[in-house]
């Protein structure tokens, strides 16, 4: 275990070795102290902070991991350029009084000749999985490994990554992980744009254009509350809203390009024949070179 001194000259416990993290977790559990876990890829923002607050509320000992996981990035994606703000992140985690930061190296997680992966194709080949076919295989693999290393009682994930949460809940159930997954609400910028580490890629104009994503979702919710139940009509309404109500004229730099618009059952990610129960309205768009996702949950029984 290392104590890292941040720029603010404060210290926080940072562990880099999986074996050391496992030993500490075992000691904590022997003392009947519950462990809360928040896995992150760093570049922390208020969304991450809200998840840490939830972990603190539901557990006695909080572990946050910082690891930019290469296996969830495709060959043409932004792994090498993904925001890395480690010292700033440590300052933030010190302020939140996190007990341990687990920050392993890539070789520590994926040693030479590593070859074991977890995949749930029926859930992973939809929505984001269509354009990122290996993404959730990488997500499931790293989360399973982190669960084995940290041994948490609860783990907290954000609702922005709704498909990820649904897939991980299935993995936990199927593989009998003794971990309860808790979800935290989407934290938004004043414009409504869902907070994401990738928002750092956006210019001010792009952020203004991207704010139409949430506005369109909320307008769609109003349309549903007024009685609209035709899936195709709703998807057409969303598409038109995204492409016609931007705050700036579309250019190659700031235009929105739709990846997908889906209305699906929240339990199994299937598109229902009739809208009933809790459904997820999920959107993915490209704003310039940055891919953004957002969603809302609508209860059609109301």
Image (cartoon, rainbow, N blue to C red):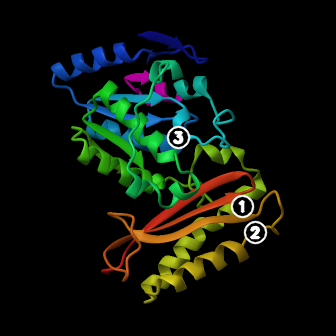
Disc 1 and disc 3: Cα gap in Å?
28 Å
Question: Which x, y percent locates residue 60?
Answer: 26, 30
Q: Residues within 10 Å of mark 2 (few under 14, many from 20)?
A: some
Residue carrying label 3: 72
Q: Indicate which disc, 1 or 3, sits on the residue closer to the N terminus.
A: 3
The stretch of residues the image draws in magenta is 92-103
**Which quadrant of the view contains residue 79?**
top right
Determine whether the residue tagged by mark 1 lies in a helix, strand or loop: helix
Q: Is residue 107 left or right of residue 147?
A: right
Residue carrying label 2: 247
Determine whether the residue tagged by mark 3 lies in a helix, strand or loop: helix
Question: Which x, y percent locates residue 141?
Answer: 41, 37
Q: Are marks 2 and 1 in contact (CB under 8 Å)?
A: yes
- Residue found at x 37% / y 23%: 99
Image quadrant holding the N terminus, namely top left
Q: Which mark is residue 208?
A: 1
> Is residue 250 shown in magenta?
no
């Amino acid at each position: 275990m290392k104590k890292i001194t941040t720029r603010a000259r404060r210290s926080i416990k940072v562990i880099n070795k999986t074996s050391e993290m496992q030993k500490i977790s075992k000691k904590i559990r022997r003392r009947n102290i519950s462990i809360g876990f928040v896995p992150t890829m760093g570049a922390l923002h208020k969304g991450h902070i809200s998840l840490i607050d939830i972990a603190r509320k539901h557990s006695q000992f909080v572990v946050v991991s910082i690891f930019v996981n290469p296996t969830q990035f495709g060959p043409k994606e932004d792994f090498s350029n993904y925001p890395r703000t480690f010292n700033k992140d440590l300052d933030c985690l010190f302020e939140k009084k996190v007990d341990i930061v687990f920050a392993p190296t890539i070789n520590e997680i994926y040693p030479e000749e590593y070859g074991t992966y977890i995949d749930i194709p029926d859930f992973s080949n939809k929505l984001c999985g269509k354009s990122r076919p290996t993404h959730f295989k990488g997500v499931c693999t790293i989360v399973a490994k982190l669960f084995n290393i940290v041994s948490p009682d609860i783990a907290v994930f954000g609702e922005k990554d709704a498909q990820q949460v649904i897939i991980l809940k299935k993995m936990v159930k199927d593989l009998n992980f003794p971990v309860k997954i808790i979800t935290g609400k989407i934290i938004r910028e004043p414009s409504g744009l869902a907070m994401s580490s990738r928002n750092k890629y956006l210019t001010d104009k792009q952020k203004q254009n991207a704010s139409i994503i949430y506005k369109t979702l909320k307008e769609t919710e109003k349309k549903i509350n007024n009685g609209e139940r035709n899936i195709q009509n709703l998807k057409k309404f969303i598409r038109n809203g995204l492409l016609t109500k931007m705050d700036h004229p579309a250019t190659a730099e700031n235009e929105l390009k739709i990846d997908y618009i889906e209305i699906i059952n929240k339990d199994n990610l299937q598109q229902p024949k009739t809208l009933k129960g809790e459904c997820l309205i999920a959107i993915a768009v490209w704003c310039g070179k940055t891919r953004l996702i957002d969603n809302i949950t609508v209860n059609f029984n109301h």
